Image (tube, helix red, strand yellow):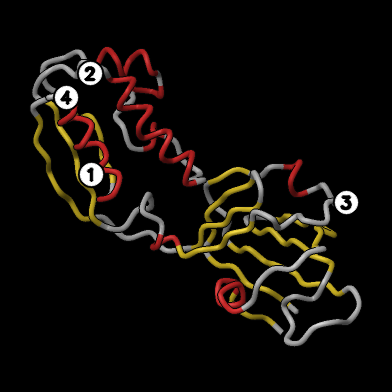
Amino acid sequence: MKTDLIDLLGKTEIVHPTRIAAVEASHRELRITIAGYPWWRPGTGGGEERIVFSFEGVEEGQLDAATLLDMQEDEALEVFLVSRLADEPWADTGTFYASYCSEPLPDPLRLFAVVEDYLWDAGAPRSARDYLNVPCGYLSRFCALAGTASFLVAEAPKHLHDMIIAELRRQNVTHNVLMSERPSKRGVFVQIGGTSFVCEGATAEI
């Protein structure tokens, strides 16, 4: 029987021992077999059972082999979060804000650090380079750009935009903002230990 993984995790609490018994990957699909205490079933007691998590349409992110292949770890799901992408404040929610500076930015690396640290803390499979205007990904070019008289500094959804604007104000930089609409990105955000990725759907097969 298959069920929505987000719904399952919302109704039940993971109990250890729980370990990864197998990992299978094919074209944009990841299947993880979990073995251990059957926390996903009503009631208590019973011997070891297995459940399979399927993640379809895997997109951006990174897979940490040390997490997924350590099959002796009895608390493999100690860090295991599955949420709708629309609920993540760093995700593409449809409305984007383009921030333009009309004078040099005194400390561009501080702005980069503010965005990067937030994304790191959130476990997002992205970096500040995905939102700040970092030419070809080079920080040196971002710093050079930030030293000019007029430039696009960032394009970001509302929550990240607010952080960026707060930092521009802290650095006392004159700026303006243009708002645009983009298609909202639907999907699921998954964190398993050091692994985090975005996929189209997540189910559990009992």
**Residue 28 picture location, percent across and down:** 62, 55
Q: Which residue is mark 4?
A: 151
Q: Mark 2 and 1 residues: CB-CB less than 8 Å, in contact?
A: no
Measured in 3D between alpha carbons, the distance from the residue under mark 2 to the one under mark 4, in whole angstroms, is 7 Å
Mark 3, other Cα within 10 Å: few <14 / some 14–19 / many ≥20: few
Three-letter amino acid code of the residue under disc 3: Gln
Measured in 3D between alpha carbons, the distance from the residue under mark 3 to the one under mark 2, in whole angstroms, is 49 Å
Q: Earlier in the sequence, mark 2 or mark 1?
A: 2
Q: Is residue 206 left or right of residue 91?
A: right
Q: Nearer the viewer, mark 1 or mark 4?
A: 1
Circle on res. 72: 3
Three-letter amino acid code of the residue under disc 4: Phe
Q: Which residue is mark 1?
A: 162
Q: Secondary structure at mark 3?
A: loop
Measured in 3D between alpha carbons, the distance from the residue under mark 3 to the one under mark 1, in whole angstroms, is 43 Å
**Residue 66 picture location, percent across and down:** 76, 41
| Residue in the foreground of this view, choosing between 174 and 131 | 174
Circle on res. 146: 2
Q: Nearer the viewer, mark 3 or mark 2?
A: 3
Q: Secondary structure at mark 1?
A: helix
Q: Tell me where residue 87 sits by quadrant.
A: bottom left
Q: Is residue 190 above or below residue 129?
A: below
Q: Is residue 51 above or below residue 145?
A: below
Q: Mark 2 and 4 residues: CB-CB less than 8 Å, in contact?
A: yes
Measured in 3D between alpha carbons, the distance from the residue under mark 1 to the one under mark 4, in whole angstroms, is 18 Å
Q: Is residue 78 left or right of residue 98?
A: right
Residue at the image point whose x is 75% and y is 69% from the top: 52
Q: Nearer the viewer, mark 3 or mark 4?
A: 3
Q: Mark 3 and 2 residues: CB-CB less than 8 Å, in contact?
A: no
Measured in 3D between alpha carbons, the distance from the residue under mark 3 to the one under mark 4, in whole angstroms, is 52 Å
Q: Mark 3 and 4 residues: CB-CB less than 8 Å, in contact?
A: no
Three-letter amino acid code of the residue under disc 2: Ala
